[in-house]
Image (cartoon, helix red, strand yellow):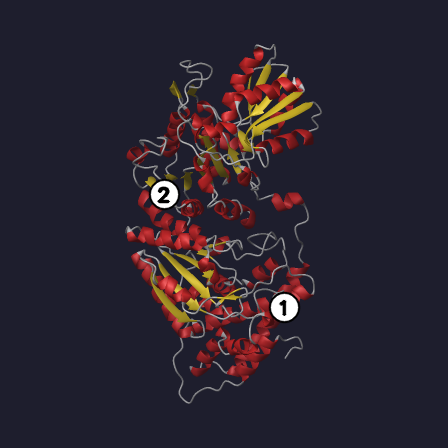
């Protein structure tokens, strides 16, 4: 034995050496050898990662030791079945790689050493993922991948029904693994609820959930029977359970469940009872919270030892030979670890960010060209409705969905008529859960669709914002662009609704969106801009995989007039123009003041600009249109033109958009006069009290006069 054997390895090797074949050999499945090979490779990857950490060359030590029975699930599936894996599914990954003749050990070792040669994330994070293996990389955010898995499952059969090209075979099923502690997370509950909700309606949801239950959430034990009771009581979800130290039963149960899901297109969950070795991660000391006798008892439940017993009992192998194979694999993995540690890591910020959010300006513009203009002057709501119709008509892979968007046509009528025109397969209502709405979009997008989900109100987004931050925005980053989930998330927001208010319908907090790397934030005000910008976002989602948040100012949906009642000044004719990402629009050419604004601020600023003329002040008003990426060049140019800048910000003073706009001006070297006027740091109350905290035209005028 090598001098640096871990106590876990010492116990395993001693137990292997003591195995004696029975007088009468039993039966062993052909896949048992494949299972053993994947299991010992995975265990040695964990050991090697710990060794590299001691050498200062490993940056990730959450391992799969004790969970290696999940390799049997991989063997029950096809390598073209999309897999979204828990961070302890290392043996699954290695078994899946072996199915296509690939050695997955270097992938894992290059992942823990943050090597640029790692095939999926390229040194950005340690994830299980590979495009050729249909393994979609997942972050470590707890349970955040489950809603996407449900979305992928629904998308597979929806694509077949609609005749849309799909990234997966038409008879594929989805596998999604997670831990027992993760089951308690609201995101997991949302995904399981959505699965049952869809299955209850007889919608195809071919997903196999794999709950890898080691009984611990870091140091907190799961109550006895909790996981089994929670999963088995789920309506519409077939439940089976098996112990990870019974490899024959795991193989048989996994195969039976996989076949059932594939045939019936219905969801199931395999509750795989496992153990956890080597603590939660490298810095975790189990002795602080686990009794020694519990730790020792787990050694006899080792899935590697269980598979070895099966092989020896069948007369297929001897314990001595298996021990020798383990040590040979240990040497091979150690060599792969040393090789990975010698490989280069990301060296520049540009290299890190290269796959974050590409922008193919010309290709996006070319895709938008050819859209049909609308001759009549329309409101913002009608402009968006027309743009959605044009998108659905020109791009058969687009889907429009959300709460109340189908028969009702949306709370404000923005999607009216689209369900009848394009059918329930493409325009449909969802259950009332923003996490599941975005999860459906995530799964549909990675499967070949261009989803346009609607979040009914901006305040409702905060329930599910991590689906954008932790999942949607990171996929290209952690897969070097090999996987994409381009989408356009329509969000009704901002304040100033008349007769229907309160915080939850007048939220102006966009700060949670602005700090998500790579996220495109469109904030149109005028009908013509809204239509063109929506088409640009769809094109960017399709061409570049862009994740776009499309903020629609509710108060302007049905606005018709600008200065006076009946003037129709806010109506606009919809042209076929392309509005590039990060481009502003300027109104007027005044030389005294530049007003930078967006959303409802545009209407107010244009009205104030006319009032300022009575004071002899000529102002130009700049509609930013895009809050990310900001139109930096346009902002700087228009600021220099007057040397007096007022940022008109309807969002809150603290954390509002104006902070970023002012920082952008300073970074650009602007040295003229500068001020901002904002809404108060408050939630928006009901009724006329809202006017006390929301930015007003009088406040804008006063700030402009003070600046000039």
Q: Is residue 271 visible?
A: no
Q: Is residue 431 visible?
A: yes
Q: Secondary structure at mark 1?
A: helix
Q: Residue at point 32% right, 51% down?
A: 198
Q: Quadrant of the N terminus?
A: bottom right
Q: With respect to residue 435, does 319 lie above or below? A: below
Of the pair 657 and 87, the residue shown nearer to us: 657
Q: Quadrant of the C terminus?
A: top right
- In the image, which disc is placed on residue 164? 2
Q: With respect to residue 347, does 77 lie above or below? A: below
Task: Identify the residue position indicated by label 1 in the image.
Answer: 334
* Res 386 quadrant in image: top left
Say left or right for 108 vs 69.
right
Residue 524 coordinates in the image, percent (x, y) = 48, 28
Q: Residue at point 46% right, 73% down?
A: 33
* Res 271 quadrant in image: bottom left
Q: Residue furthest bottom?
A: 23
Mark 1 is surrounded, within 10 Å at the Cα level, by few (under 14), some (14 to 19) or many (20 or more) other residues, namely many
Which comes before the other along the chain, label 2 or label 1?
2
Q: Residue at point 49% right, 37% down?
A: 548
Residue 224 coordinates in the image, percent (x, y) = 43, 69
Residue 59 coordinates in the image, percent (x, y) = 64, 59
Say left or right for 261 vs 39.
left
Q: With respect to residue 16, does 455 lie above or below? A: above
- In the image, which disc is placed on residue 474? none
Q: With respect to residue 414, does 433 lie above or below? A: below
Of the pair 5 and 198, the residue shown nearer to us: 198
Q: Secondary structure at mark 2?
A: loop
């Amino acid at each position: 034995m090598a001098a640096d054997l871990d106590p876990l390895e010492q116990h395993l090797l001693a137990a292997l050496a003591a195995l004696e074949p029975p007088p009468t050999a039993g039966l062993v499945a052909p896949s048992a050898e494949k299972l053993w090979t994947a299991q010992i490779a995975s265990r040695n990857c964990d050991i090697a990662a710990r060794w590299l950490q001691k050498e200062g060359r490993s940056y990730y030590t959450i391992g799969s030791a004790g969970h290696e029975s999940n390799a049997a699930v991989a063997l029950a599936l096809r390598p073209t079945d999309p897999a979204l894996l828990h961070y302890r599914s290392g043996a699954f990954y290695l078994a899946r790689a072996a199915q296509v003749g690939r050695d997955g050990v270097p992938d894992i070792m290059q992942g823990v050493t943050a090597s640029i040669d790692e095939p999926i994330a390229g040194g950005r994070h340690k994830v299980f993922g590979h495009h050729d293996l249909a393994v979609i990389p997942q972050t470590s955010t707890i349970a955040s991948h489950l809603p996407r898995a449900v979305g992928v499952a629904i998308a597979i059969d929806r694509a077949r029904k609609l005749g849309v090209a799909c990234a997966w075979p038409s008879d594929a099923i989805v596998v999604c693994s997670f831990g027992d502690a993760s089951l308690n997370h609201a995101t997991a509950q949302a995904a399981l609820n959505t699965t049952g909700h869809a299955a209850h309606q007889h919608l195809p949801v071919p997903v196999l959930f794999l709950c890898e239950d080691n009984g611990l959430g870091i140091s907190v034990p799961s109550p006895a029977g909790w996981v089994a009771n929670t999963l088995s009581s789920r309506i519409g979800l077939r439940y089976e359970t098996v112990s990870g130290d019974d490899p024959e039963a795991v193989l048989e149960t996994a195969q039976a469940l996989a076949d059932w899901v594939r045939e019936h297109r219905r969801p199931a969950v395999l509750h795989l009872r496992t153990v956890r070795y080597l603590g939660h991660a490298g810095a975790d000391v189990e002795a602080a919270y686990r009794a020694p006798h519990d730790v020792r008892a787990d050694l006899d439940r080792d899935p590697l030892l269980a598979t070895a017993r099966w092989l020896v009992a069948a007369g297929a192998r001897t314990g001595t030979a298996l021990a020798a194979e383990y040590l040979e694999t240990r040497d091979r993995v150690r060599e792969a670890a040393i090789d990975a540690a010698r490989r280069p890591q990301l060296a520049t910020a540009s290299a890190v960010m290269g796959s974050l959010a590409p922008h193919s300006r010309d290709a996006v513009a070319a895709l938008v060209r050819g859209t049909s203009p609308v001759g009549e002057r329309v409101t913002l709501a009608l402009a968006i409705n027309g743009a959605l119709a044009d998108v659905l008509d020109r791009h058969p892979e687009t889907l429009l969905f959300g709460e109340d968007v189908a028969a009702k046509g949306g709370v404000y009528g923005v999607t009216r008529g689209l369900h009848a025109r394009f059918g329930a397969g493409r325009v449909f209502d969802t259950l009332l859960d923003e996490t599941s709405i975005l999860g459906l979009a995530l799964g549909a997008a990675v499967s070949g669709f261009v989803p346009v989900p609607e979040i009914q109100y901006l305040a409702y987004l905060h329930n599910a914002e991590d689906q954008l931050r932790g999942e949607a925005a990171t996929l290209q980053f952690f897969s070097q662009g090999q996987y994409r989930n381009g989408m356009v998330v329509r969000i009704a927001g901002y304040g100033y609704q008349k007769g229907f208010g309160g915080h939850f319908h007048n939220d102006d907090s966009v700060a949670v969106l602005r700090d998500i790397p790579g996220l495109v934030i469109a904030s149109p005000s005028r009908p013509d801009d809204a239509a063109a910008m929506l088409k640009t976002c769809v094109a960017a989602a399709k061409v570049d995989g862009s994740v776009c948040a499309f903020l629609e100012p509710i108060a302007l949906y049905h606005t018709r007039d600008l200065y006076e009642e009946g003037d129709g000044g806010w109506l606009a004719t919809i042209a076929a123009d392309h509005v590039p990402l990060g481009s502003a629009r300027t109104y007027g050419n005044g030389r005294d003041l530049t007003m930078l604004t967006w959303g409802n601020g545009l209407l107010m600023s244009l009205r104030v600009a006319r009032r300022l003329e009575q004071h002899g002040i000529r102002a130009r008003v700049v509609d930013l249109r895009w809050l990310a990426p900001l139109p930096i060049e346009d902002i700087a140019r228009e600021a220099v033109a007057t040397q007096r800048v007022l940022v008109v910000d309807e969002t809150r003073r603290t954390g509002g958009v104006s902070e970023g706009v002012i920082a952008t001006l300073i970074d650009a070297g602007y040295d003229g006069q500068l001020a901002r006027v904002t809404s108060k740091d408050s939630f928006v109350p009901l009724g006329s009290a809202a006017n006390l905290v929301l930015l007003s035209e009088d406040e804008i005028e006063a700030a402009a006069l003070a600046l000039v």
